[in-house]
Image (cartoon, rainbow, N blue to C red):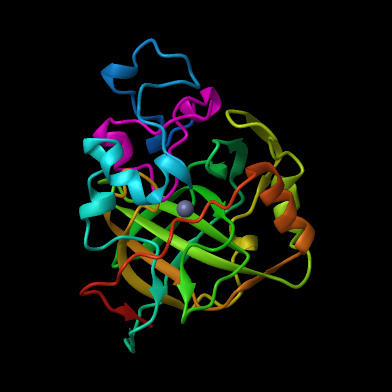
């Protein structure tokens, strides 16, 4: 059984665009928001089983139905600023460069049934709008969730950050199949094949090495791309891609067994700044 997302608001608000890692003992020991206490309803539940509704990427619990699976998921169907999007209708803006203060900190890797996630040790952050957002975790989607001018990529990385108030900022990176990305292998070598597993990483992975050298970006407001689809997420999509090998993409899709990209959501009133 895949681990489920949880209902507790303080947790879901920080669960980012992927399912949260609740239920993985190792992640609960980490000092990041995903380690927030579990909701009452889950007290006593086995680590990898909760009573939260099951959601998936196809069938009766697939993206078209997320909004009706649970009252807490209503934003998935009612939200007007949902992610992912096709980045289009771009407006030129003087976007302030994102300030990166990253150090190697990817210390554990987990398979939660919806993605492969690397949890990050405290102490790495970005500054956006004059506010520091700490890097909590990064995870992947294949194929990409966001598309850029209609273009889909084989893999997209989401680097999930939270400020001291729990507001989220996600840096999205598109990966193109060109050449191996050695830093990723530090994590990939230990990728759990089974949902619910978490493994420690012997060598801390550098998030910086997984981002493109040029850090220009697109910006828009969106949501988590998984239930509960909470809005108010600052999306920062790198405007240059990073290279990866076909084997590295395959290693991910092999353990996921299915695509893990939510379909594109309507832009509605939003614009994309570039
Ligand atoms: Zn994501």
The residue shown at (68%, 50%) is: 252
Quadrant including the N terminus: top right
Q: Nearer the viewer, residue 222 or 218?
A: 222
Left of 159 or right of it: where is 245? right
* In-image side of 131 versus 110 (left or right): left
Residue 139 part of the magenta-drawn span:
no
Depth check, front residue: 246 or 100: 246
- The part of the image, by quadrant, that contains residue 80 is bottom left
The residue lying furthest to the bottom in this view is: 92
Position above or below: 76 against 93: above
Q: Quadrant of the C terminus?
A: bottom left
Question: Magenta: predominant secondary structure element?
Answer: loop
Q: Residue at x 78, y 69 (%)?
A: 179
Q: Does 35 appear above or below 132?
A: above
Q: Nearer the viewer, residue 101 or 240?
A: 240
Q: What is the tally of numbered marks visible in this picture?
A: 0
Residue 5: image x %, image y %? 39, 34
Q: Quadrant of residue 220?
A: bottom left
- Residue 241 vs 64, above or below: the answer is below
Percent from the top left, x then y, of residue 238?
Answer: 50, 72
Residue depicted at x 42% and y 37% = 32
Image coords of residue 158 (percent x, y): 50, 56
Find the magenta span and give its range. 1-29
Magenta segment: does it hold 25? yes
For this orientation, the residue located farthest to the top is: 44
Q: Nearer the viewer, residue 103 or 274?
A: 274
| Residue drawn at x 47%, y 26% as measured from the top left | 28
Q: Position of residue 60 (x, y in %)?
A: 41, 41
């Amino acid at each position: 059984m895949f681990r489920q997302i949880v209902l507790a608001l303080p947790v879901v608000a920080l669960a980012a665009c992927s399912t949260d890692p609740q239920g993985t003992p190792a992640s609960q020991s980490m000092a990041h928001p995903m380690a927030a206490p579990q909701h009452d309803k889950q007290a006593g539940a086995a680590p990898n089983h909760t009573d939260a509704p099951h959601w998936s990427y196809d069938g009766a619990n697939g993206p078209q139905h997320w909004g009706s699976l649970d009252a807490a998921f209503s934003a998935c169907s009612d939200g007007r600023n949902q992610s992912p999007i096709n980045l289009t209708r771009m407006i030129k803006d003087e976007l302030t460069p994102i300030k990166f203060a990253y150090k190697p900190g990817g210390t554990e890797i987990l398979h939660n049934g919806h993605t492969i996630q690397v949890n990050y040790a405290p102490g790495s952050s970005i500054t956006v709008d004059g506010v520091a957002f700490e890097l909590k975790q990064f995870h992947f989607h294949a194929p990409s969730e966001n598309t850029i001018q209609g273009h889909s990529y084989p893999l997209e990385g989401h680097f999930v950050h939270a400020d001291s108030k729990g507001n989220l900022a996600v840096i999205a990176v598109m990966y193109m199949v060109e050449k191996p990305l050695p830093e990723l292998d530090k994590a990939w070598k230990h990728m759990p094949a089974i949902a619910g597993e978490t493994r420690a990483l012997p060598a801390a992975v550098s998030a910086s090495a997984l981002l493109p050298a040029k850090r220009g970006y697109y910006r828009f407001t969106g949501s988590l791309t998984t239930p509960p689809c909470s809005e108010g997420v600052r999306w920062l999509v790198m405007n240059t891609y990073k290279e990866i090998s076909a084997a590295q993409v395959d290693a991910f899709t092999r353990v996921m067994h299915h695509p893990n990209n939510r379909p594109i959501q309507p832009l509605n009133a939003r614009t994309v700044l570039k």
